[in-house]
Image: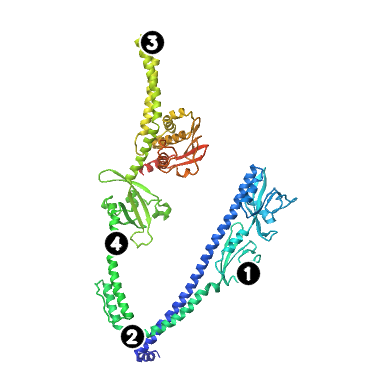
């Protein structure tokens, strides 16, 4: 049977076979594609409609929830205020601020109304008037917020009761409001998308309390319509309300149904057209197709192509023209790719930082010349953690290990260059999205920040010198006092010696010399503290005695303390010696003390409290100065930002303090109230030996 059919098919004219083949191969795929795209377009349209509905519902629900939460916040504030101020002014103020509130009530521990401030009723409550429903009363007893069911007031408007508890004299009382929902209903009514889409709100019992079709208010949701509409729901937390948006499927699919009908007509027309083209192609287009096939084979083999030429202006001629244009574009794009590759190489080599590709197995597959220059050739095969960190195991905080982008923090390490100078480098790791197996899934970025670190040290030194300049007069007075004493005692001693005073014996001369020696030591101590403070140093770890460091810092500001008659209270607990940079910590203390002194006009106090908490040094500096404005607090650590008048500050002090405390691994926090003073809290972890060595290597 099959042989006879094949024989019969082979005996038919080629034109008939081309026509039949053209009809089948054009109509069937087009029909299948049409149905396929119709189905997926329909599903995509449904998904987009739901996404749009969800977005509208989320925005509206968020807005309504914010209104309700704002009302609760007002109630909580009202409860607090009422507890300390037994007046009705706050009640009337809340009514004035929120037009949706119909009345405010104050209830006793039994839920009986003891006070009412109403917009429409008399303020006098009825005798033993219970304000809560049973469900709301139960919720009120067990929660910090209580919601009532939606009801209709005497004007036919939907309202809901909200209440919060507060404790007075050990009794749980409450403040509640009756909230009109007209504003919420108005929002829902104004968000109608089109004539076929409905947006409505249901309470916890399933009743419609807001609908764009007012005839459906206070009716139950009809479950039979769930299969004939496209809809989404959004629940309100706490209120147990549900916001619903629905659209009939017939209305939603109407555009795509019209498109499908037009598509079928197009398929039919294309089938006829392709059938005619198939007949002509079988007789006439064979030769150009062969030419194209040969040209494609040459293109695959990489041979240079010459433009094809055919004496046709139809589709095949256009196809040949398109092929010629495509071959030219491929040639141009190949050249462009080569150019971009060259440009990329220039960027990678001239970026001024080391780059490398690293696999998930920590193997380096490629590095640029800058990174290669940092290491010996026999080190290139080492894993990245061994090459960069010099460790024998992968870094625990590396993104390659934990695969979390938030852990991709800056890491510092040092290397010696070919001149023997130590250079500081910062490196980060970034994941790649489109990768090939074995080529590397991560980019390692290594940057030389030695100059940046030197600039940071210069800023710290600049702050020191600026502080010294601002304290110059204080130092002059501090040194002048002991020098004056020395001068007076030495002149008096010389006069008595030259006058051969018989009462001048060895004991009295010893007293004179001791006074001169003590004041000389005082000058020496002031000068030593000044030199230590102004010395330019790198981060140097040593043992820190907090009490000694604090006393040295106080000695630099003793004169302005005495001049302004400021009382200084110092209370330090049992604080062990810890490791860090003593001079850097002293610079922080001097800056903070100067700020406190500058903020006090006269006769103020500065308190310093130090104690140990959870292996952390907590150091609190509190002053009674003028304080810092609330809007200035977020900017106090910005470099060159200062609220002091010209000549009083550089704006570097707190920025430098912030950087130094970060180097200690600690935190610095400010709290201030204008007109009452400022409190600074320093928290510095006490380093263990292992932690200190690790910190020093960094």
Answer with the quarter of the image where residue 558 lies.
top left
Q: Name the residue under label 2.
A: 282
Answer with the quarter of the image where residue 517 lies.
top left
Q: Residues within 10 Å of mark 1 (few under 14, many from 20)?
A: few
Q: Residues within 10 Å of mark 2 (few under 14, many from 20)?
A: some
Q: Are marks 4 and 1 in contact (CB under 8 Å)?
A: no
Percent position of residue 277, x then y: 36, 84
Task: State left or right for residue 274 relative to residue 220.
Answer: left
Find residue 505 and name its label. 3
Given this view, does label 2 or label 3 mark the residue nearer the observer? 2
Q: Mark 4 points at which residue?
A: 340
673, above or below 254, in the image = above
Residue extending furthest toward the right? 127
Determine whether the residue tagged by mark 4 lies in a helix, strand or loop.
helix
Q: Point out the tag, 2 or 4, that comes first from the N-terminus.
A: 2
Residue extending furthest toward the top? 502
């Amino acid at each position: 049977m099959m042989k006879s059919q094949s024989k019969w098919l082979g005996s038919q004219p080629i034109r008939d076979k081309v026509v039949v083949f053209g009809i089948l191969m054009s109509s069937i795929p087009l029909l299948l594609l049409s149905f396929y795209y119709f189905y997926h377009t329909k599903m995509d349209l449904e998904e987009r409609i739901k996404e749009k509905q969800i977005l509208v519902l989320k925005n509206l629900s968020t807005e309504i929830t914010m209104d309700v939460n704002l009302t609760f916040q007002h109630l909580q504030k009202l409860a607090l205020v009422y507890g300390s101020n037994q007046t009705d002014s706050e009640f009337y103020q809340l009514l004035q601020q929120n037009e949706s509130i119909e009345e405010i009530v104050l209830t006793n521990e039994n839920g009986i109304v003891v006070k009412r401030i109403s917009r429409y009723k008399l303020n006098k409550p009825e005798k033993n008037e219970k304000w809560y429903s049973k469900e709301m009363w139960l919720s009120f007893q067990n929660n910090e917020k209580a919601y009532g069911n939606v009801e209709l007031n005497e004007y036919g408007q939907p309202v809901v009761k909200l209440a919060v508890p507060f404790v007075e004299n050990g009794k749980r009382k409450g403040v509640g409001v009756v909230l009109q929902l007209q504003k919420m209903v108005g929002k829902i009514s104004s968000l109608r998308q089109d004539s076929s889409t409905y947006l409505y709100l249901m309470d916890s019992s399933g009743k419609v309390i807001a609908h764009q079709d007012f005839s459906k208010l206070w009716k139950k949701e009809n479950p039979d319509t769930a299969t004939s509409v496209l809809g989404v729901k959004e629940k309100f937390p706490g209120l147990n309300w549900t916001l619903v948006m629905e659209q009939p499927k017939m209305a939603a699919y109407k555009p795509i149904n019209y498109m499908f009908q037009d598509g079928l007509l197009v398929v039919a027309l294309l089938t006829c057209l392709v059938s005619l083209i198939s007949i002509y192609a079988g007789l006439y287009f064979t030769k150009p197709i062969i030419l194209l096939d040969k040209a494609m084979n040459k293109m695959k083999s990489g041979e240079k192509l010459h433009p094809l030429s055919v004496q046709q202006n139809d589709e095949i001629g256009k196809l040949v023209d398109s092929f010629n244009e495509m071959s030219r574009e491929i040639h141009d794009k190949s050249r462009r790719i080569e150019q971009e590759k060259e440009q990329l190489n220039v960027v990678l080599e001239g970026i001024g930082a080391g780059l490398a590709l690293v696999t998930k197995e920590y193997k380096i597959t490629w590095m640029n010349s800058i990174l290669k220059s940092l290491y010996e050739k026999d080190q290139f095969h080492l894993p990245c953690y061994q090459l960069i960190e010099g460790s024998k195991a992968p870094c625990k905080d590396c993104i390659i290990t934990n695969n979390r982008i938030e852990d991709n923090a800056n890491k510092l390490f040092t290397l010696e260059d070919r001149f023997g100078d130590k250079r500081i480098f910062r490196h980060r790791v970034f994941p790649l999205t489109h990768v090939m197996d074995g080529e590397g899934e991560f980019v390692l970025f290594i940057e030389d920040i030695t100059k940046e670190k030197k600039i940071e040290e210069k800023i710290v030194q600049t702050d020191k010198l600026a502080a010294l300049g601002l304290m110059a007069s204080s130092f002059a007075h501090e040194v002048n006092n002991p020098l004056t004493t020395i001068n007076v005692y030495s002149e008096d001693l010389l006069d008595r010696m030259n006058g051969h005073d018989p009462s001048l014996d060895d004991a009295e001369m010893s007293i004179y010399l001791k006074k001169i020696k003590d004041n000389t030591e005082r000058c020496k101590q002031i000068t030593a503290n000044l030199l230590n403070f102004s010395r330019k140093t790198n981060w140097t770890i040593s043992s820190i005695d907090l009490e000694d460091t604090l006393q040295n810092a106080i000695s630099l500001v003793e004169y302005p303390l005495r001049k302004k008659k400021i009382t200084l209270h110092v209370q330090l607990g049992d604080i062990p010696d810890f490791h860090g940079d003593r001079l850097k910590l002293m610079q922080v203390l001097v800056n903070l003390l100067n700020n406190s002194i500058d903020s006090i006009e006269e006769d103020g106090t500065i308190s310093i409290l130090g104690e140990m908490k959870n292996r952390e040094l907590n150091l609190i500096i509190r002053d009674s100065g003028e304080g810092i404005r609330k809007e200035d607090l977020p900017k106090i650590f910005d470099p060159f930002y200062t609220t002091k008048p010209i000549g009083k500050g550089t704006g570097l002090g707190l920025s430098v303090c912030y950087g130094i405390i970060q180097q200690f691994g600690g935190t610095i926090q400010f709290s201030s109230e204008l007109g009452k003073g400022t409190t600074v809290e320093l928290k510095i972890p006490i380093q263990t030996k292992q932690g200190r060595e690790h910190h020093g290597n960094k």
